[in-house]
Amino acid sequence: MADHKQLYVQGLTHLAKGDLDDALASFQQAVSVKADFLEGHLGIAQAYERKRMLDEAVAAVRKAISINPNDPLVHTSLSRLFQQKGMIPEAEEEMAISRRLQAGL
């Protein structure tokens, strides 16, 4: 059986080809192998975002945040999704969190 990193790379390959369902399946397999694999959850979010399934993408990013709330990238990702959903105050709040984390505050 492939390890979580191999499955993640497979997901990225599918994503690059536009094979969103296969990408999603690979990312989901990666996190089933290693539940706290942050990049895998972000991959799931990216695949859902490209499928225009924004609520599911938000849920995946929230899972990534629960794994590492101090990673600025996860907050930036959530901000982008909130912007797409028209949730501007929430998007601004997440971007502010990301900036604070990047500045080490």
Image (spheres, rainbow, N blue to C red):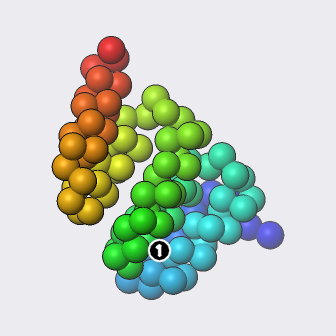
Q: Is residue 38 left or right of residue 48?
A: right
- Amino acid marked by disc 1: Thr
Whether residue 26 can be seen here: yes
- Please identify the residue farthest to the top as the structure is shown: 105
**Which residue is at 35% across, 25% downward?**
101
Q: Is residue 59 left or right of residue 98?
A: right
Estimate the x, y position of residue 63 in percent, counting from the top left: 55, 49
- Position of 37 relative to 86 (above/below): above
Estimate the x, y position of residue 18 in percent, counting from the top left: 38, 83
Estimate the x, y position of residue 36 in percent, counting from the top left: 66, 46
- Position of 88 relative to 6 (above/below): above
- Position of 78 relative to 33 (above/below): above
Estimate the x, y position of residue 69 in percent, counting from the top left: 49, 33
The secondary element bearing badge 1 is classed as: helix
Q: Report which residue position mark 1 lands on.
A: 13
- Position of 2 relative to 61 (above/below): below
**Which residue is at 28% across, 44% downward?**
90
**Which residue is at 60% across, 72% downward?**
26
Q: Quadrant of residue 51?
A: bottom left
Q: Residues within 10 Å of mark 1 (few under 14, many from 20)?
A: some
**Which residue is at 49% across, 48% downward?**
62
Q: Quadrant of the N terminus?
A: bottom right
Figure disc tally: 1
Which residue is nearer to you in this view: 42 or 88? 88
Whether residue 43 can be seen here: no
Q: Quadrant of the C terminus?
A: top left
